[in-house]
Structures are given as C-alpha cells and as structure tokens.
C-alpha cells in the first residue's frame, strides 16, 4: 500500500477505537473510500476528516462531562449551604434550651426544712424498692434458665 492511504483497521488502531465505529463514521458522513485488494482504504483527506470528527466528538463529550460536573458542584454547594444554615439553627436552639434549663434550675432550688428532707428521702426509698424488685426478677430469670437447661437436655447430654 502507498503511504498516502490507510486501512480502516490501521486508522481504528491509531485512534484507539474499533473498525465498526470507523465504518459508521464513514457511512454517516459520506466519506469517500477506495477498495484495494479487497480492503477498504482511506486517502489522506478522508483520514483527516475522520480525525476531525473524533476531535469534535471528544470536545463534545468533554463539554457534556464538564456541564455534569458543574451541575454536581452546584448541587453540592446548595447542600453545604443548607447544612450550614441548619447547623446555625441547631446552635441557636441549643442556646435557647440552655437558657431555659438554667431558668428552670433556678426555680427548682429546694426550700430549707422538713419538706426538703422528705423530698430527698422519698426518691432514695423508691430507688431501693426498685433495686430489690430488679434483684428479685433477676433471681427469677436465673431460676427459669436453670429449669430450661434441665428440660432441654437430650439422653446423649446426661454425662455433661
């Protein structure tokens, strides 16, 4: 073959694509070809047209990807802005709750005298009663577990 022609395969390898894609470009854009020894070949001007098509296609793809990336950046920027606004609202609410909590603490200062002592003893007594109930329930659970273990033993587990 002469220097001024290329086969579709050679051009496809050079451009990093396949023969089918080159053939589609040739058909779509009505690019002239020649047939030499049962091979379709392209002259220099046809090769340059296909290269130009690839360059334009690459630029178009890059622009599309750039637009997508720009859109994602805008969405992320909006989300970041929204997150910052919510964080600021949370901070304000937290400050309000702290102030409200401080004012409630100031109201709950116990008065001196017998009422304060009784109020202090009452929760302690309730706590002791709850502890004894929990202990009784734990003992009951342990007894139930032992019963379950005894019932679930098979004949081959007796020596364990």
Image (cartoon, grey):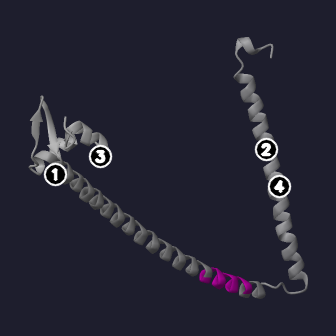
Q: Which residues are magenta?
A: 92-102
> Mark 1 or mark 2: which comes first in sequence?
1
61 left or right of 89 in image: left
**Marks 1/2: CA–CA distance:** 92 Å
Q: Residues within 10 Å of mark 3 (few under 14, many from 20)?
A: few
- Residue to which mark 4 is pinned: 131
Residue 45 — which label?
A: 1
Look at the image and tell me in which quarter the C terminus lies.
top right
Magenta: predominant secondary structure element?
A: helix
**Marks 2/4: CA–CA distance:** 11 Å
> Mark 3 or mark 2: which comes first in sequence?
3
Q: Nearer the viewer, residue 131 or 102?
A: 102
**Marks 3/4: CA–CA distance:** 81 Å
SS at badge 3: helix
Residue 138 — which label?
A: 2
Decide: marks 3, 2 in contact (CB < 8 A)? no
Residue at (21% x, 55% y) in the render: 53
**Marks 3/1: CA–CA distance:** 16 Å
Q: Is residue 97 magenta?
A: yes
Residue 29 in percent (x, y) is at 11, 51
In the rendered image of this protein, does residue 119 appear above or below residue 55? below
> Mark 2 or mark 4: which comes first in sequence?
4
> Mark 1 or mark 4: which comes first in sequence?
1
> Mark 3 or mark 4: which comes first in sequence?
3
Residue 146 — which label?
A: none
């Amino acid at each position: 073959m002469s220097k001024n022609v290329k086969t579709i395969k050679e051009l496809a390898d050079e451009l990093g694509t396949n023969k089918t894609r080159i053939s589609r470009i040739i058909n779509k854009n009505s690019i002239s070809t020649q047939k030499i020894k049962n091979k379709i070949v392209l002259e220099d001007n046809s090769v340059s047209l296909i290269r130009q098509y690839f360059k334009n296609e690459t630029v178009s793809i890059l622009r599309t990807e750039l637009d997508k990336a720009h859109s994602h950046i805008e969405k992320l920027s909006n989300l970041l802005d929204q997150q910052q606004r919510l964080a600021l609202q949370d901070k304000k609410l937290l400050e309000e709750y702290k102030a409200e909590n401080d004012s409630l603490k100031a109201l709950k200062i116990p008065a001196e005298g017998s009422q304060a002592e009784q109020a202090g003893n009452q929760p302690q007594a309730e706590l002791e009663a709850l502890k004894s109930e929990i202990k009784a329930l734990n003992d009951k659970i342990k007894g139930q577990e032992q019963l379950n273990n005894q019932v679930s033993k098979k004949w081959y587990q007796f020596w364990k």
